[in-house]
């Protein structure tokens, strides 16, 4: 659960891989990973039911494509929007993204009137998913607080020339988030790159970012580590005001 200075009515958490009913490579709290997920559908359905017990209502899931589209939701939707981030100002509308190395980024204004979550892998980060999400929130960056959830750590994320170039060709400061390993290969700091993008949006209050999915197999799914694996859920919502 995030430790960040936002209004108490903002609730958020990231699930671990524990506490569900899935088996084998998907053990045990797999909430589903799209077409590549070969887990038993009944197990995924039951895991999502278990998740919904901790929410005011079931979340609106997204069809994630490593892009920059943002779904702005005023009410839950049964059909998953094609997007990699979601925003709401409505109470009791849980937003969710699925992750297993990509970085979940929670955003909220300090007053608790708007919240968002973004699925920020390197493709989405490089293309501007954070910038699009902040724009959809409609709040000044100085009023927004961010929290970075579990993602692939800097010492586990080896990337090639394409990833290095995607960030550094437009922002020279991004080079500080890469450590050369051998010709054409770098270690990339995904959380550091997210912090740069958040700072460019005027967001200086950034928390979290210290959990590596690859290095903690007991708690986290990791596609980079395991290949065949489940997905965790990052969920955020606004509690209704008390009468």
Image (spheres, rainbow, N blue to C red):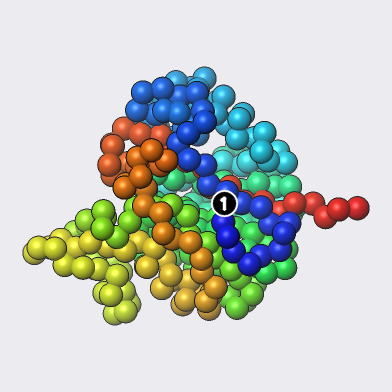
Q: Quadrant of residue 178?
A: bottom left
Measuring from the top left, give residue 50's x and y in whole percent: 61, 30
Residue 200 drawn above or below residue 225? below
Check disc 1 and report the residue beneath it.
Answer: 1
Helix, strand or loop at mark 1 = loop
Q: Measuring from the top left, give residue 31's x and y in whole percent.
A: 50, 34
Whole-percent x, y for residue 131 in the image: 49, 68
Q: Is residue 29 left or right of residue 127?
A: right
Residue 155 in the image: state x and y as whole percent.
26, 58
On screen, residue 107 versus residue 93, left or right, reads left
Dividing the picture into quadrants, the one containing residue 72 is bottom right
Residue toward you, 157 or 202: 157
| Residue occupying image coordinates x 29% and y 79% | 172
The answer to whether residue 156 is above or below residue 228 is below
Side (left or right) of 100 relative to 21 = left
Q: Residue shown at 29%/60% (left/top)?
A: 154
84 horizontally vs 151: left or right: right
The residue sitting at 60% across, 35% down in the picture is: 51
Q: How many marks?
A: 1
Asked whether 123 or 26 is in front, the reply is 26
Answer few, some or many: residues within 10 Å of disc 1's Cα (few below 14, many 20 plus, some between 14 and 19).
few
Residue furthest toward the right? 243
Q: Name the residue nearer the viewer: 20 or 61.
A: 20
Residue at image point 43% right, 52% down: 150
Asked whether residue 13 appears in the rendered view, the answer is: yes
Using the image, determine if residue 19 lies above or below residue 133: above
Instruction: Please say whether residue 161 is visible from this viewpoint.
Output: no
């Amino acid at each position: 659960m995030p430790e960040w200075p936002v209004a108490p009515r903002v609730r958020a958490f990231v699930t671990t891989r524990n506490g569900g009913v899935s088996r084998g490579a998907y053990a045990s709290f797999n909430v589903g990973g799209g077409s590549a997920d070969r887990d038993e559908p009944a197990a995924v359905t039951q895991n999502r039911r278990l998740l919904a017990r901790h929410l005011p209502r079931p979340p609106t899931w997204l069809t994630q494509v490593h892009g920059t589209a943002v779904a702005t939701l005023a009410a839950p939707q049964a059909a998953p929007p094609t997007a990699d981030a979601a925003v709401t100002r409505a109470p009791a509308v849980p937003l969710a993204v699925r992750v297993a190395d990509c970085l979940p980024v929670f955003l909220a204004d300090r007053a608790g009137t708007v919240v968002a979550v973004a699925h920020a892998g390197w493709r989405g980060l490089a293309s501007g998913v954070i910038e699009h999400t902040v724009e959809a929130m409609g709040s000044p960056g100085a009023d927004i607080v961010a929290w970075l959830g579990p993602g692939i750590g800097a010492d586990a994320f080896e990337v090639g020339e394409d990833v290095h170039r995607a960030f550094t060709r437009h922002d020279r400061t991004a080079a500080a988030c890469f450590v050369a390993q051998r010709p054409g290969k770098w270690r990339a700091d995904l959380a550091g790159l997210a912090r740069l993008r958040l700072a460019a949006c005027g967001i200086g209050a950034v928390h979290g970012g210290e959990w590596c999915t690859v290095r903690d197999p007991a708690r986290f799914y990791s596609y980079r580590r395991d290949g065949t694996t489940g997905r965790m859920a990052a969920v955020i919502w606004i509690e209704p005001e008390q009468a």
